[in-house]
Image: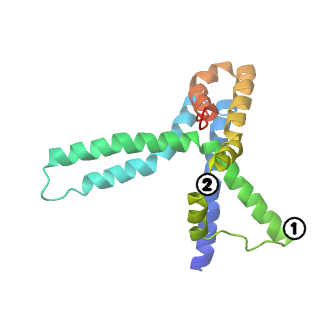
């Protein structure tokens, strides 16, 4: 029973990025007001960090004055919460694509090909692979993450043609999705 719950929970967690991306896109095009649905997605992304910060606030050591503890939690929260939510939002379309790709591959292998059903990489193999990466792997990573700028560009064009006023809300997020880090050596 526990194993089945773990499988279900993994599937649920795999669908969250796609659901949040879809909610943003629907909020910008079909649902209204756009700012509300954008705020809902940002609140969902912020929720784990805010809960962790509240937990840190409640877990005050006895030997630390409250003001000092409050300042330390506020500093951690300001840095960690903001950055974590910003990165989660920036990588949302890529993560959605990556998770949906894994789901489709798994379903295809289980229902159609019945081959490579046990294909997985142990964490020790992944650690070794990460240590041996070079610039070509970094370039491959940039290419594989090109889905985010492609989605951003398509959304920008679509919104500017159909709902140009929504770009005031969606524009900053689309710019974040469309931004690509500089390539090494250039």
Residue 64 appears in the picture as rendered: yes
Please, is residue 150 above or below residue 136 in the view?
above
Q: Secondary structure at mark 2?
A: loop
Q: Quadrant of the C terminus?
A: top right
Q: Which of the 4 image quadrants contains residue 26?
A: top right
Label 1–label 2 contact, CB within 8 A: no
Other residues around mark 1 within 10 Å, as few (<14) / some (14–19) / many (≥20): few
Percent position (x, y) of residue 183? 61, 36
Residue farthest toward the right in the current orientation of the protein:
112
Q: Secondary structure at mark 1?
A: helix
Residue 18 appears in the picture as rendered: no
Q: Which of the 4 image quadrants contains residue 31?
A: top right
Instruction: For marks 1 and 2, give the CA distance.
Output: 34 Å
Tell me if 113 is positioned left or right of 28 in this view: right
The residue at 63%/75% (across/down) is: 4
The residue at 62%/60% (across/down) is: 12
* Front position in the image: 131 or 154: 131
Q: Quadrant of the N terminus?
A: bottom right
Percent position (x, y) of residue 112? 87, 67
Whichever of callouts 1 and 2 sits on the residue coming sooner in the sequence is: 1
Tell me if 136 is positioned left or right of 130 in this view: right
Residue annotated with mark 1: 112
Picture mark count: 2
Tell me if 65 is positioned left or right of 121 in this view: left
Tell me if 102 is positioned left or right of 125 in this view: right
Residue 133 is labelled as 2
Other residues around mark 2 within 10 Å, as few (<14) / some (14–19) / many (≥20): few
Percent position (x, y) of residue 82? 42, 39
Q: In the image, which is nearer the foreground, mark 1 or mark 2?
A: 2
* Front position in the image: 167 or 89: 89
């Amino acid at each position: 029973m526990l194993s089945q719950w773990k499988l279900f929970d993994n599937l649920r967690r795999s669908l969250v990025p796609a659901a949040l991306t879809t909610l943003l896109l629907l909020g910008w095009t079909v649902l209204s007001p756009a700012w509300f649905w954008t705020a809902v997605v940002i609140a969902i992304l912020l929720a784990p960090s805010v809960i962790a910060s509240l937990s840190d606030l409640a877990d005050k050591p006895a030997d630390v004055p409250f003001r000092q503890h409050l300042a330390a939690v506020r500093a951690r929260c300001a840095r960690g919460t903001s950055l974590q939510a910003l990165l989660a939002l920036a990588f949302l379309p890529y993560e959605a694509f990556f998770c949906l790709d894994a789901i489709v591959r798994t379903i295809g292998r289980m229902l159609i090909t019945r081959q490579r059903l046990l294909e997985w990489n142990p964490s020790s193999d992944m650690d070794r692979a990460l240590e041996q990466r070079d610039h070509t792997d970094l370039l491959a990573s940039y290419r594989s993450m090109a889905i985010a700028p492609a989605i951003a560009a398509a959304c920008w064009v679509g919104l500017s043609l159909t709902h140009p006023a929504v770009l005031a809300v969606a524009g900053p997020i689309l710019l974040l999705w469309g931004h690509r880090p500089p390539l090494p050596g250039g």
